[in-house]
Image: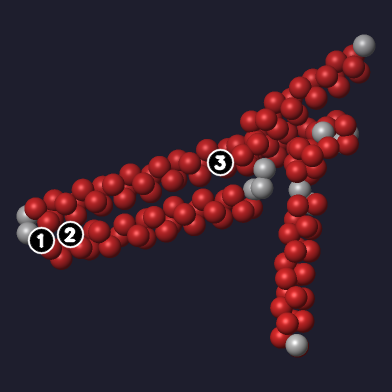
Amino acid sequence: MLLKERKSNIDLEKYLNKLEIEAGDDLMILLEHGPDCFETYELELLLDRVLKQSKQLLSMRRMTITVLVVALFSVLLSVYAFLNEQIIFGYLFLGFLPIYMGLTGFMYFRFHKNNLTINKTPYLKNLLEKEILQRQNKTLF
């Protein structure tokens, strides 16, 4: 019984932590409720954050491509080693392949776990730019 209560407390803490992270993410609030909930300066800060997120996404994609190219090169080296009857080197280069794949998966999941709105970055960028432009035009007239 005590173990069951402890497990339910741990599950509750995990759930509360997840809610706290999602509630603290202004970009999620922007997606759910629209830009009317924010002041203009807050929208400009969010736009800076979205631009930073898109740069991080581009950087992560470049790293992923680099790791995958290195993995392909490793496979080619292992094939070359097997053809030249260097079995030890062939297995050595093939042994690096799970490391490269694990590294790529780790980078991907770690990045997406920390950035819940990463898939909506282009939409958020357009939404914020349009709203900021509309608000600037309203203040001019």
Q: For label 2, count other residues whose C-alpha is less than 10 Å away and answer few (under 14), some (14-19) or many (20+).
A: many
| Amino acid type indicated by mark 2 | Gly
Q: Quadrant of residue 62?
A: top left
The residue lying at 25 percent from left, 52 percent from top is: 74
Q: Tags 1 and 2 in contact by the CB under 8 Å rule?
A: yes
Q: How is the image coloured?
A: secondary structure
Q: Residue at x 90, y 17 (%)?
A: 138
Q: Is residue 85 above or below residue 56?
A: below
Residue 82, x across and y down, in percent: 12, 56
The residue that mark 3 highlights is: 57
Is residue 41 visible to us here? no
Asked whether disc 2 touches disc 3, contact meaning CB atoms under 8 Å apart, the reply is no
State how far apart marks 1 and 3 are (Cα): 40 Å
Going by the image, does 53 lie left or right of 84? right
Q: Secondary structure at mark 3?
A: helix
In percent of width and height, residue 103 lies at 43, 57
The residue singled out by tag 1 in the image is: 86
Q: Which part of the image, by quadrant, shows the N terminus?
A: bottom right
Q: Which mark is residue 90?
A: 2
Q: Residue at x 77, y 81 (%)?
A: 5
Amino acid type shown at disc 1: Gln
Q: Residues within 10 Å of mark 3 (few under 14, many from 20)?
A: some
Against 136, residue 113 (above or below) is: below
Camera-side mark, 2 or 3: 2
